[in-house]
């Protein structure tokens, strides 16, 4: 018992160091997201060139996604994060010096955006893959929810600090960002090494065979795709996660664009966006309790039905505050659904493939959010605000009904530490991945 308690304390210390390190990094990343386009606009005077910065960051994160997972599975994950933090300290510090000297140019901003996106993708894959080894299994849902809360808090704090620091002096956001990444690097030095995951044994029915050509080949980058494609629960859960990101992003764009086009005051639009961020942060903090109250796949189903109802309410109910309040309600519930899927993903994936599966899932669900503004804009142009929102509500309701009728989601195992619901059927075995065809 004493040995187990010491092991839990060591694991808890490792998770605290990782969580705090990533909190500083995410703060710096969110600060740069709002500051870089504004600097590019000030330097070039061209909105299109300013838009290049956001595109480069997003493209770098997307393109680095699959190799990030393979790197996280092949090398010491702590070392991967240390190298990424060191690169970010260098580019943030270098840009701060250029700005201080008045020598900055658009290519310098592009370099920072490129390194920022790629290094962040690497750290996200390595950091999330480490979590199951740093917390006891029964505390995994809480750890995942805490990560979600950290992301929301970093986004809110980074955006606010970025605008304030830029107003003081254009170099200050990057001085602070450099210091934040340096703190994150120092905290990681106090963690134990995280050696590469052992290859999954071919005889293990829960693990895919190592691809031909050995580790490091092109097949390794696709192994996360193969694992998700063969596993019924993860495959279906990822499909619903991608659809939810697409629906929410499209609805958010429709609401903001129509509010701006209708002459709503920019202050009220900002409050609306703030309600979404605050709802997400509060929802992430409440997610551990909500996951206990909603065992199995219920969080996914509840969020889809709530999304459909709230979107219909935004379309039909009057009031300038209604869209912000209802979007905030959706944002409050979304972290519980996300934490549910992420926890199952971490539990059902062998450590040897965890980084790649995390990367593939992030790219797939992120793609839904990436095309959401385009889909929302097309719907808004073709049908108008109310009809576009009702179309999104109907699609969300259809997705919710499909989730309710899905036998795979109904047979989802209880999460560790969850209490069985009243009159709940006996807990089934963890679903095995489908066998690949011969």
Image (tube, helix red, strand yellow):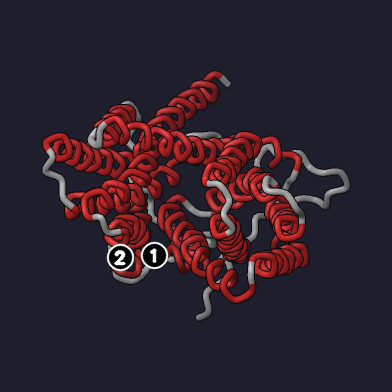
Residue identified by numbered label 2? 214
Q: Residue furthest top?
A: 2
Where does the image place residue 87, in percent across and percent down from the top left?
22, 43
Task: Give me the C-alpha separation between circle 1 and circle 2.
Answer: 7 Å
Residue 239 in the image: above or below residue 69:
below
Label 1 secondary element: loop
Residue at the image position 59 percent from the left and 35 percent from the top: 139
Screen quadrant of the N terminus: top right
Confirm or deny contact between disc 1 and disc 2 (CB under 8 A).
yes
- Quarter of the figure with residue 335: top right
Instruction: Name the residue nearer the viewer: 275 or 287.
Output: 275
Q: Residues within 10 Å of mark 2 (few under 14, many from 20)?
A: few
Residue 81 located left or right of residue 229: left
Where does the image place residue 356, in percent across and percent down from the top left?
41, 57
Q: Is residue 13 visible?
A: yes
Mark number for residue 263? none
Residue at the image position 42 percent from the left and 39 percent from the top: 159
Q: Residue furthest front?
A: 263
Residue 232 located left or right of residue 101: right
Where does the image place residue 166, in percent across and percent down from the top left?
31, 36
Q: Residue furthest bottom?
A: 438
Residue at the image position 38 percent from the left and 50 percent from the top: 198
Instruction: Name the residue nearer the viewer: 349 or 284.
Output: 284
């Amino acid at each position: 018992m004493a040995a187990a308690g010491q092991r839990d304390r060591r694991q808890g210390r490792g998770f605290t160091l990782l969580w705090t390190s990533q909190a500083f990094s995410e703060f710096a990343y969110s600060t740069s997201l709002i500051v870089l386009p504004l600097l590019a606009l000030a330097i070039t005077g061209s909105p299109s060139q300013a838009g290049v910065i956001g595109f480069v960051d997003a493209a770098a994160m997307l393109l680095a996604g699959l190799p990030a997972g393979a790197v996280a599975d092949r090398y010491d994950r702590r070392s991967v994060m240390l190298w990424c933090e060191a690169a970010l300290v260098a580019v943030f510090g270098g840009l701060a010096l250029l700005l201080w000297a008045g020598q900055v140019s658009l290519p310098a901003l592009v370099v920072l955006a490129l390194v920022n996106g790629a290094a962040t993708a690497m750290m996200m894959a390595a950091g999330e893959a480490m979590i199951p080894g740093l917390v006891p299994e029964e505390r995994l849902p809480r750890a995942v929810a805490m990560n979600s809360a950290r992301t929301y808090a970093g986004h809110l704090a980074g955006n606010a600090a970025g605008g304030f620091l830029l107003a003081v002096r254009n170099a200050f956001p990057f001085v602070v960002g450099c210091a934040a990444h340096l703190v994150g690097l120092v905290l990681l030095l106090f963690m134990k090494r995280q050696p590469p995951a052992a290859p999954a044994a071919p005889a293990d029915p829960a693990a895919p065979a190592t691809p031909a050509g050995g580790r490091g080949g092109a097949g390794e980058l696709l192994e996360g795709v193969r694992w998700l494609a063969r596993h019924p629960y993860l495959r279906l859960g990822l499909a619903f996660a991608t659809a939810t990101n697409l629906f929410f992003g499209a609805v958010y764009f429709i609401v903001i664009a129509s509010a701006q086009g209708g002459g709503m005051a920019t202050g009220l639009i900002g409050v609306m966006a703030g309600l979404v961020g605050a709802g997400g942060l509060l929802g992430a903090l409440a997610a551990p309790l909500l996951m206990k109250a909603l065992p199995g796949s219920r969080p996914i189903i509840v969020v889809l039905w709530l999304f459909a109802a709230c979107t219909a309410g935004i379309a039909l109910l009057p009031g300038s505050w209604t869209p912000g309040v209802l979007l905030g309600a959706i944002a409050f519930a979304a972290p519980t659904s996300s934490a549910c899927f992420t926890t199952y993903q971490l539990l059902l994936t062998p450590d040897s493939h965890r980084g790649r599966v995390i990367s593939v899932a992030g790219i797939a669900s992120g793609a839904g959010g990436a095309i959401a503004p385009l889909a929302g804009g097309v719907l808004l142009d073709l049908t108008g605000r109310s009809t576009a929102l009702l179309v999104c509500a109907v699609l969300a309701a259809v997705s919710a009904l499909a989730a309710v009728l899905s036998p795979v989601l109904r047979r989802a195992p209880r999460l560790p530490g969850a209490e069985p619901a009243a009159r709940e059927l006996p807990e089934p075995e963890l679903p095995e991945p489908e066998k690949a065809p011969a």
